[in-house]
Image (cartoon, rainbow, N blue to C red):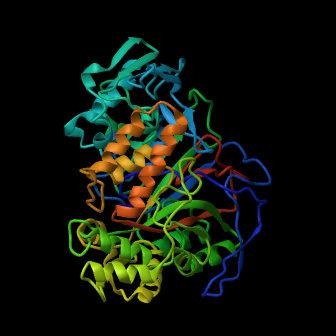
């Protein structure tokens, strides 16, 4: 399921070219050069003040500002809250409300030293009680937090200790050398002790902005929090607008009615129009979105590992990148760990349609015919599906691409049809990625794949305190996913974000950007 509806996100930015550098979109469409503003790079600094106007896709009426259960209000969450630990621009863990953290010798107990001098928007001082309460709230079954499935096997909420106001001690049920990385998830933003019932509407946190107004699936506004521990943000306010149609959002940007299109990956034709306008441009976020063709391993023919292996060997990821992305991305080779991740391994099986034919014959599925579901929900779904269809034909696999309605795609198709297209935002720490999306029994395991050896390997990796050895174990986990798993990963796509030419300091991690530094020229 894509992070627009759920699991999170953050991609580490790459590239630093000068403003106005040309970007050649090459490929079968004959796209021409388009000027693109690279992420985080501008000629001049923003002016203080002003209101940034953000257009975002509509959410459901159940949208909430409670981070533990939030599924869509990402832009609000990043403005209103902080985590204990965050992911830095270089992909490594960075301090947020926790200044430091250290494990015991077996990585069984973690101690977090918390930042002093931090206040919530209502004036209350941040303490270890708030940090402990936040974790207990996530683990509470009544909260139904997506992150609970990741943390519950590790944490006993009653075992959390707060020896003083600025120390949190977290004993784990089993050793986990990657535990702090699990707290970078967007469900882990810190709320005040006892504040769960009100959090969904008040948005009281320690972030650089405080809530002025919020309407589920509708407009809202946050204003600068002058007492933010890291300093006052550049902007005075951010206004959010819910705009249903991508073309309507793009037209609003071109007309100067909004400054930023959030959670929107522009299609190539729209990106060219935006980049050529006087008012707007496009920023390109390297390998920001991880695209997947999940095979439901509980449904025939994908119950047979030989069929899954054949489906992977049958197609050429480089062909998919060329056709579907027009070169604006990286071949995935069925490895969900992004190429820029320190844990990524480059080894992978080669495209081999003849071996795919052989495996299908062994499995009794010679001349396999499958249906691949897609929709207009994301502009790359159908091009990816058609590119896969074209490439897999060489192995004798007949793929019928079916287009489903966008508004019901993630309720009627995702995790229900045997083969479909989806995507996630990159940037998850590797243990979070594997635990949430590939571990047996996880509610977001979109292929329903269950492999005891893989799960045991994750447990070994978590318990390994030697960094090199742990990285090797996660490498073995990638090999198992590529060889036996149900997820095909054809590509990592660069995300094309439409922004006003007045925006300065836009430095994105997925669609979570630097709220302190972003601003406007001529505000």
State whether residue 84 is above or below residue 454.
Answer: above
State whether residue 389 is above or below residue 465.
Answer: below
Horizontal and vertical percent position of residue 59: 35, 59
Q: Give 467 or 51, whichever is nearer the viewer.
A: 467
Residue 416 position by quadrant: bottom left
For the N terminus, the image quarter is bottom left
How many numbered circles are shown? 0
Residue at the (46%, 37%) spot, across then down: 181
* Residue 270 shown left or right of residue 244 in the figure: right
Horizontal and vertical percent position of residue 321: 55, 75
Residue at the (31%, 77%) spot, across then down: 405
Q: Give 84 or 261, whichever is nearer the viewer.
A: 84
* Residue 54 shown left or right of residue 129 in the figure: right
Residue 7 visible, this orientation: yes
Horizontal and vertical percent position of residue 22: 76, 71
Residue 140 position by quadrant: top left
Horizontal and vertical percent position of residue 183: 43, 36
Q: Give 379 or 229, whichever is nearer the viewer.
A: 379
Residue at the (41%, 45%) spot, across then down: 432
Residue at the (50%, 44%) spot, across then down: 472
State whether residue 38 is above or below residue 164.
Answer: below
Residue 259 visible, this orientation: no
* Residue 369 shown left or right of residue 247 in the figure: left
């Amino acid at each position: 399921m894509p992070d627009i509806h759920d699991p999170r996100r953050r991609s580490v930015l790459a590239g630093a070219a000068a403003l106005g550098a040309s970007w050649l979109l090459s490929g079968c469409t004959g796209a021409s050069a388009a000027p693109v503003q690279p992420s985080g790079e501008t000629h001049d600094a923003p002016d203080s003040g002003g209101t940034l106007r953000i257009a975002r896709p509509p959410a459901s009426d159940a949208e909430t500002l409670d981070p533990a259960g939030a599924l869509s209000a990402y832009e609000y969450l990043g403005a209103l809250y902080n985590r204990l630990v965050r992911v830095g621009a270089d992909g490594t863990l960075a301090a947020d409300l926790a200044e430091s953290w250290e494990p015991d010798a077996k990585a069984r107990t973690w101690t977090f030293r918390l930042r002093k001098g931090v206040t919530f928007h209502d004036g209350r001082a941040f303490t270890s009680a708030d940090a402990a309460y936040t974790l207990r709230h996530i683990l509470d079954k009544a909260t139904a937090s997506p992150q609970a499935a990741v943390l519950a096997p590790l944490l006993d909420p009653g075992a959390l200790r707060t020896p003083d106001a600025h120390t949190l001690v977290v004993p784990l049920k089993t050793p986990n050398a990657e535990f702090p990385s699990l707290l970078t998830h967007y469900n882990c933003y810190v709320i005040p002790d006892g504040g769960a019932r009100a959090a969904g509407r008040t948005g009281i946190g320690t972030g650089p902005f405080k809530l002025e107004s919020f309407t589920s699936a509708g407009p809202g506004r946050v204003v600068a929090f002058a007492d933010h521990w890291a300093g006052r943000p550049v902007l005075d306010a951010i206004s959010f607008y819910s705009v249903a149609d991508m073309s309507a959002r793009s037209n609003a940007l071109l007309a100067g009615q909004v400054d930023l299109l959030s959670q929107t990956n522009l299609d190539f034709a729209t990106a060219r129009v935006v980049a050529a306008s006087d008012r707007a441009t496009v920023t390109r976020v390297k390998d920001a979105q991880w695209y997947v063709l999940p095979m439901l391993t509980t449904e025939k023919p994908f119950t047979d590992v030989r069929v899954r292996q054949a489906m992977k060997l049958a197609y050429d990821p480089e062909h998919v990148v060329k056709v579907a992305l027009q070169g604006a991305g990286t071949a995935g080779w069925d490895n969900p760990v992004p190429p820029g991740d320190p844990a990524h391994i480059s080894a992978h099986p080669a495209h081999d349609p003849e071996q795919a034919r052989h495996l299908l014959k062994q499995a009794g599925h010679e001349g396999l015919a499958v249906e691949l579901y897609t929709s207009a929900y994301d502009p790359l779904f159908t091009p990816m599906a058609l590119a896969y269809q074209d490439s897999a034909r060489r192995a004798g696999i007949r793929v019928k691409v079916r287009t489903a309605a966008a508004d019901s795609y993630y309720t009627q198709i995702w995790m229900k049809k045997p083969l479909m297209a989806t995507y996630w935002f990159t940037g998850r720490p590797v243990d979070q990625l594997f635990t949430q999306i590939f571990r047996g029994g996880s509610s977001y395991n979109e292929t329903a794949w269950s492999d005891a050896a893989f799960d045991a390997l994750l447990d070994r990796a978590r318990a390994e305190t030697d960094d090199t050895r742990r990285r090797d174990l996660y490498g073995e986990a990638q090999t198992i996913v590529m060889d036996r798993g149900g997820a095909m990963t054809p590509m990592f796509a660069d995300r094309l974000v439409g922004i006003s030419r007045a925006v300065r300091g836009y430095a994105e991690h997925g669609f979570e950007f630097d709220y302190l530094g972003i601003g406007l020229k001529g505000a």
